[in-house]
Image (spheres, rainbow, N blue to C red):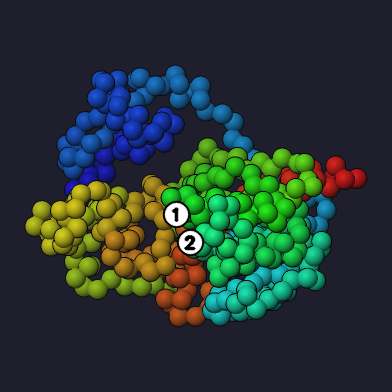
Amino acid sequence: MFNNVVMSKYLSLSETAELLGKSKETLRRWDNDGILSAVREPVSNYRVYRKDDVYTLFGDFLENNIEEEVSNYIEPDNEYSVLELFAGAGGLAIGLEKSGLKCVALNEIDKWACNTLRKNRPNWKVLEGDIKDFDFPDYKNKVDVVTGGFPCQAFSYAGKKLGLKDARGTLFYEFARVVQEVSPAICIGENVRGLLSHEKGKTLKGMISILDEIGYNVVPVQILKAINYKVPQKRERLILVGIRKDINIKYEYPKPYKRIYNLSDALKKGDLFDKNVPKSDGAKYPKSKEDVLDLIPPKGYWRDLPLDLQKEYMGGSFYLGGGKTGMARRIGWDEPCLTLTCSPAQKQTERCHPEETRPFTVREYARIQTFPDEWKFDGSLAQQYKQIGNAVPVNLGQELGYSIIEFLNKYYSARS
């Protein structure tokens, strides 16, 4: 099992790669070439790197590579408006609001999420129901931004170049339809990283060609890592930005921050929150899983179990290879949380509390997603976890908001 005192002398492969700004493949090659050799951590037998070795070889680089912390903060020169589609429980909307943008309307089909939006923001116009049932002509040329976290769905390919009509029946079609109806200066779509490889990249290419067809140039797609934007969670989101073709203003993605926040920052009083996380209800593990997770140390996972228990707990997966590091995983205080899921107790995606053998509570979940403590979620416990797990982290939304404001400031300044 992990021994935290011993492990403090070492860096994992991921930590070393992140520290040096190199890929894991590069580090493995350096290990083979004897440039920076990995060792076996004496207690867990994991492949790790001695901190002393890393700093001896790369200390000068690390000192010289520390730049002053960036700030994406920018004030809006005007009142800019947002129409949000697939709004969920409001993670992106709160972030955009905190940056200085005004949400004029939000569409969402899930009734519990709609109740959450209404309860927390009675002034927001919540359009509950299937987006297919809504038209938005009243917002034409009156909204600066359309945003939407549309699901990743395959298209039917009628021709060599996918057009809007080929995407009918998908929710991206509805997103594009609304963008075409409203004609905002900029549209922002967000999705899971998997969209990059979905249908071997054809789905993303189709989306880009559809936005091109309706009059929008797509900025090179980026994957934003939430940990780089004041979110204590290893979550990644693909961002798809479309700029109306009559606008010749460059959009810049938000700059990443140097500081990485960890679970302690999320749940305890500090720089992210001004008090400890409030008490709240939470899911529980069944006794059989609790007995297993009792044996897992902070930052450990199923490989920290005795061999016979590893085989019993993993079943056939034990022999399939791969790390499967999310299974029977206990998060450590000094690391960001793994990506939260919609069901905190399900197998393969355990995120166990560092000290207590239980899943994170609803308020702990919300903190890890950087929701404010006063934001209350409606519905059953399962519905609340689902809303939080599906959300865009609020702080990531805020940083995106600043990048949108910077773009719109330049756009309106050029027009005047």
Along the viewing direction, whichever of 55 and 197 lies nearer the viewer? 197
Marks 1 and 2 sit apart, C-alpha to C-alpha, by 8 Å
In the rendered image, the vertical position of residue 261 relative to residue 164, given as above or below: above
Residue 386 lies, in percent from the top left, at: 45, 70
Numbered disc 2: secondary structure: loop
Q: Say how many tags the image has.
A: 2
Q: Is residue 78 left or right of residue 309?
A: right
Mark 1 and mark 2 residues within 8 Å of each other at the beta carbon: yes
- For this orientation, the residue located farthest to the left is 308
Please, what is the three-letter code of the amino acid marked with disc 2? Ala
Give the residue pinned by disc 2.
Answer: 154
Measuring from the top left, give residue 98's x and y in whole percent: 67, 57
| Number of the label disc, if any, that sits on residue 198 | 1
* Mark closer to the chain start, 1 or 2: 2
Considering the image in quadrants, where does the C terminus appear? top right
- Asked if residue 362 lies left or right of residue 148, the reply is left
Closest to the observer: 124 or 174? 174
Badge 2 local density, few (<14 within 10 Å), some, or many (20+)? Answer: some
- Quick one: 86 or 327, which is closer to the camera? 86
SS of the residue under disc 1: helix
Q: Position of residue 82 (x, y in %)?
A: 72, 61
Q: Residue at x 76, y 59 (%)?
A: 183
Mark 1: few/some/many CA within 10 Å (<14, 14-19, 20+)? some
Instruction: Identify the residue at the far front of this view.
Output: 159
